[in-house]
Image: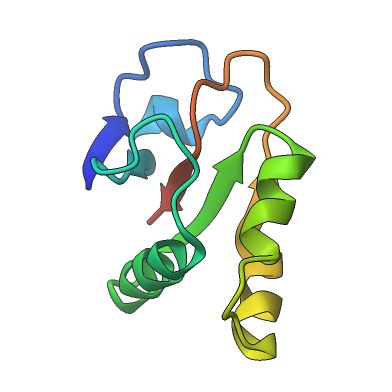
């Protein structure tokens, strides 16, 4: 994984935390610019949580979110968990699916 946006933000973020250093955007290097597989998203979200931080996984549209939530092989608990933190980012400056991590 890698940090894709931190402080200072490279563009005018609507999230003020990018201007005061309390958040960062991170993404998988393996899935650069693409939606990551649901299992990878779950594992990364868990690791971020264990570090004491919180995160959401931002995607660009409803079809990307649905593809994650409807992944074959997910159990009900996994699917319900994904529903709580996979969100659609409608900001026109959004460039790729990623985790938005807050400390």
Which of 31 and 14 lies nearest the eye of the viewer?
Answer: 31
Residue occupying image coordinates x 70% and y 79%: 80
Residue 84 falls in which quadrant of the image?
bottom right
Is 48 rendered above or below residue 24? below
| 59 relative to 51 in the view: left or right | right
| 100 relative to 60 in the view: left or right | left
Is 82 rendered above or below residue 67? below
Place of residue 33 in the rendered image (x, y in percent of width and height, measured from the top left): 41, 29
Residue occupying image coordinates x 45% and y 36%: 34
Residue occupying image coordinates x 34% and y 41%: 31
Name, please, the residue furthest toward the right. Answer: 62
Place of residue 101 in the rendered image (x, y in percent of width and height, measured from the top left): 42, 50
| 82 relative to 38 in the view: left or right | right
Which of 80 and 35 lies nearest the eye of the viewer?
Answer: 35
Residue 88 falls in which quadrant of the image?
top right
Residue occupying image coordinates x 37% and y 72%: 43
The colour scheme of the drawn protein is rainbow
Which of 60 and 63 lies nearest the eye of the viewer?
Answer: 63
Place of residue 2 in the rendered image (x, y in percent of width and height, measured from the top left): 21, 41
Place of residue 7 in the rendered image (x, y in percent of width and height, measured from the top left): 29, 26
Is 49 rendered above or below residue 16? below
């Amino acid at each position: 994984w890698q940090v894709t946006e931190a402080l200072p933000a490279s563009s005018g973020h609507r999230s003020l935390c990018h201007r005061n250093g309390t958040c960062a955007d991170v993404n998988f290097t393996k899935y650069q610019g693409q939606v990551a597989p649901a299992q990878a998203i779950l594992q990364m979200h868990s690791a971020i949580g264990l570090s004491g931080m919180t995160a959401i996984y931002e995607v660009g549209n409803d079809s990307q979110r649905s593809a994650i939530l409807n992944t074959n092989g997910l159990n009900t608990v996994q699917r319900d968990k994904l529903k709580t933190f996979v969100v659609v980012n409608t900001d026109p400056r959004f460039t790729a699916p990623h985790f938005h991590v807050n400390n």
